Amino acid sequence: MIAGLHGILIETGVNLAIIECGGVAYACRTTQTTLNSIGAVGSEVRVYTYMAVHENAIELFGFADKAELHCFQMLLTVSGIGGKAALAILSDLTADRFALLVASGDSTALTKIKGIGKKSAERIVLDLKDKLIKANPALKETAAVSVQVYTEDNFSEALAAFAVLGYQQEEVMPILLKQDENASAEELIRLTLREIGRQKSS
């Protein structure tokens, strides 16, 4: 099994990254999220991989981080969700935002993704909600707050942005919860970063 690749990104395409390692070029199916984060063609990259063995083919999937790989693997356990659909979901949503939407039971948000219908979205939430919360207990409280107080388009976007910036949920949540519930995602991010800066400088 190939668990990861470390080499030079020599070509990209739609949901595709070709990485040369030791003179061998590996074609990895991947998400737009990963393509946006691993670097430009010609740069040195590292991806975590999942190898799917089918009757007539072997597919290699690559991801920029373990969180995205974990979400992809969980999606594959859902009946009716294959690699193509899982990539589509994680191209539209970061791993953190996907986990938050599922944990909060927001199947409607998933139907906005091309190729994901109402039944598939509901099945994803039904099958993965408890698994995601069990893997990350902090999601339960975060999801409850986001449903009761904030809308998906401000709070969860801000939370996802902080995850991309490398902040942990437990670090930003207490500060986010103090902000105006009607604030935009950009405003939530700005105010939270300002407070984090104040706390570090005090």
Image (cartoon, rainbow, N blue to C red):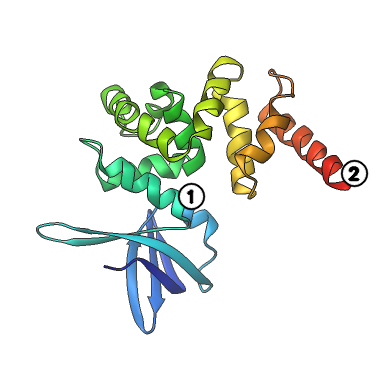
Q: Estimate the x, y position of residue 8 in percent, counting from the top left.
A: 47, 75
**Position of 166 relative to 158 (above/below):** below
Q: Estimate the x, y position of residue 178 in percent, counting from the top left.
A: 74, 24
Q: Which residue is mark 1?
A: 33
Q: Estimate the x, y position of residue 78 in percent, counting from the top left.
A: 25, 36
Report if residue 94 is visible in the image: no
Report if residue 10 is visible in the image: yes
Q: Nearer the viewer, residue 132 or 93?
A: 132
Residue type at tag 1: Thr
Q: Estimate the x, y position of residue 122 in percent, counting from the top left.
A: 31, 24
Question: Which residue reaches farthest top?
Answer: 148
Question: Which residue reaches farthest left?
Answer: 55
Q: How many C-alpha atoms fall within 10 Å of the one at disc 1: few (<14), some, or many (≥20)? A: some
Q: Nearer the viewer, residue 149 or 11?
A: 149
Q: Residue at x 61, y 39 (%)?
A: 169
Q: Which residue is mark 2?
A: 202
Contact? badges 1 and 2 (CB < 8 Å): no
Q: Residue at x 33, y 71 (%)?
A: 26
Disc 2 secondary structure class: loop
**Position of 17 relative to 198 (above/below):** below
Residue type at tag 2: Ser
Quadrant in which the C terminus is drawn: top right
Specify whether 124 is left or right of 167: left
Q: How many marks?
A: 2
Q: Residue at x 39, y 78 (%)?
A: 21
Mark 1 against mark 2, which lies toward the viewer? 2
Quadrant in which the N terminus is drawn: bottom left
Disc 1 secondary structure class: helix
Tell me the number on the disc at residue 108: none
Specify whether 77 is left or right of 96: left
Question: Which residue reaches farthest bottom?
Answer: 23
Which of the 4 quarters of the picture holds residue 174? top right
